[in-house]
Amino acid sequence: MLWFWAAYVVVTFIGCMHCIFNIYVLHMRPMDEHGMGEAYEKTKPWHPLYNLLLYPVAGWLYMRGLPDPTWQAALWTGLLWAGICIVFDLVAWVLVKHPWTLSFKEFYVRYQPWISMIYVIIFIAPLMGYWFVK
């Protein structure tokens, strides 16, 4: 789980920094009472890329650390990682109230196709890691 959470934290940090960069350097409109704002909206297409760069590395590090990596272990790990991410995202970004909280519709409908791409990337990351190990 160390590699999953490391990738999750780094991806989240990069996404937040990208949004902050858009606000302070590119002078894009920040979030307000009407939504997350232009600064966040412009980062959405980049989110799958952050995940595509980091989660396969996490998958490779995880699979490399197994005494006998198998395709089945990679598949189960991908299911576990994607499942944990889906549940944790619901809690962290929708249910728990904070300045960047999104509604269910904002997170799961308006964030399409990006959120679905992210979950697919997280699911396949251990499989990609297995492919690189073998």
Image (cartoon, rainbow, N blue to C red):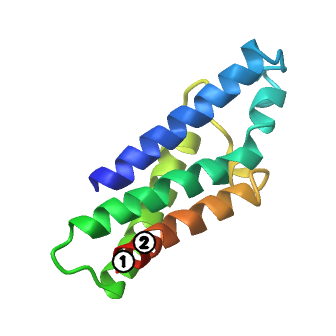
Q: Residue at x 75, y 23 (%)?
A: 22
Horizontal side, residue 72 vs residue 29: left or right: left
Position of 39 relative to 58 (above/below): above
- Location of the C terminus (image quadrant): bottom left
Position of 26 relative to 85 (above/below): above
Q: Which residue is drawn at 67% across and 21% down?
A: 20
Name the amino acid type tagged 2.
Answer: Gly
Residue 112, image x, y percentages: 76, 58
Name the amino acid type tagged 1.
Answer: Ala
Q: Is residue 96 visible?
A: no
Label of residue 128 in the image: none
Could you tell me if the residues under marks 1 and 2 are in contact, i.e. CB atoms within 8 Å?
Answer: yes
Mark 1 and mark 2: span between their CA atoms? 6 Å
Position of 60 relative to 2 (above/below): below
Label of residue 78 in the image: 2
Q: Which residue is drawn at 26% across and 79% down?
A: 69
What residue occupies the far left of the structure in this picture?
67
- Location of the N terminus (image quadrant): bottom left
**Neighbourhood count class around disc 1 (C-alpha, 10 Å): few under 14, some 14–19, many 20 upward:** many
Circle count: 2
Q: Mark 1 points at which residue?
A: 74
Q: Is residue 38 visible?
A: yes
Horizontal side, residue 71 vs residue 127: left or right: left
